[in-house]
Image (cartoon, rainbow, N blue to C red):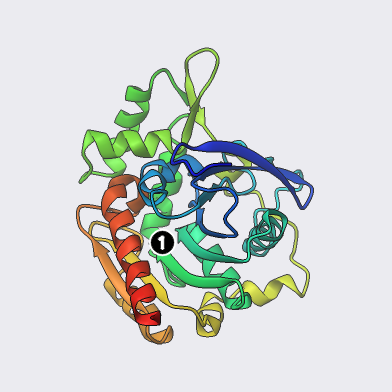
Amino acid sequence: MASSNKPRDEFAEVNGLRLHYREWGDARARNALLLLHGYAETAAIWDEAAHDLAREFRVIALDQRGHGQSGHAPDFDYSRATQVEDVEAFVEQLGLRSITLVGHGMGGANALCYASEHADVVTALIVVEAAPEVLRGGVERLRRMVGTADQFDSLEDAVDSMRPFFPYAEDEQLERRARGALAQGTDGTWVWDFDPALRDASLRPPEPDPGQRRLADLWECADRVQCPVMIVRGSETDMLTPEAIQRLHRRIIGSRVSLIEEAGHPVPSDQPADLALNIREFLQNLQANAV
């Protein structure tokens, strides 16, 4: 297939689930940027940044289990270990030899864990608004946001419902956020585009087996990462403190910290162009230093 920066919607059977992904660029390339979204998001959250990056790279944005068009886990298993196992099987199925892994929030934690165990595959890691220590207030605000309503009559109504949770955000930023978390039904209403179980804090996944518990401690995962790392933080975030970012920076020797201005926790939708620019410059510097 010829190179293209138009997105293509594809599916892969992974660990008993049909996972959806969006792809830009040359599908024949065995090296790719793999983008993992956060909680209460879908692969669509990356559309603008991916379109930008696809001028130079094969880019793949995965709907992780239970999100977007991907299958829902019948046993409600959305644990970090299981999501990382999905990434392992997905990379293998697509025949990717190497990846630059980019993860936001929940996807950032998954990316950190995957990179810690696959030094032979991950050539670089970009962790966006993710760290072993997060602010409880930010997590609770995110859960309150997805609990505001089951559906919205219009995209404008959804944007209005999000506004109190992102007081710094412009309408354009909020609309991208809404489009990255909601899907329009046949009746014209907009609904959250992920398994309703993910909105129920009382549901608990099955107990992990001993092998899965190895990923429980994100600090241990961070200590094992061997590839170059860029840690990205939004200037208006309510999820991470500067101290948490600096601790992660110190634990990952040689890592770089990048601050995206006028962005909160949802950096990919708040400032997609600036995020793409930071990713491109980071990778270009790595290439230049490798020569």
The residue lying toward the viewer, choosing from 39 and 207, is 39
Q: Residue at x 49, y 44 (%)?
A: 3
Q: Name the quadrant of the N terminus.
A: top right
Q: Residues within 10 Å of mark 1 (few under 14, many from 20)?
A: few
209 up-or-down from 186: above or below: below
Residue 70 visible from this viewpoint: no
217 up-or-down from 28: above or below: below
The residue lying toward the viewer, choosing from 34 and 240, is 34
Q: Position of residue 66 (x, y in %)?
A: 63, 43
In-image side of 114 versus 286 (left or right): right
Q: Name the quadrant of the C terminus.
A: bottom left
Q: Secondary structure at mark 1?
A: helix
Residue 9 visible from this viewpoint: yes
Q: Amino acid at mark 1?
A: Arg
Q: Residue at x 60, y 59 (%)?
A: 30
In-image side of 98 versus 250 (left or right): right
The residue lying toward the viewer, choosing from 172 and 274, is 274
In-image side of 45 versus 10 (left or right): left
Q: Which residue is mark 1?
A: 136
Q: Residue at x 54, y 34 (%)?
A: 193
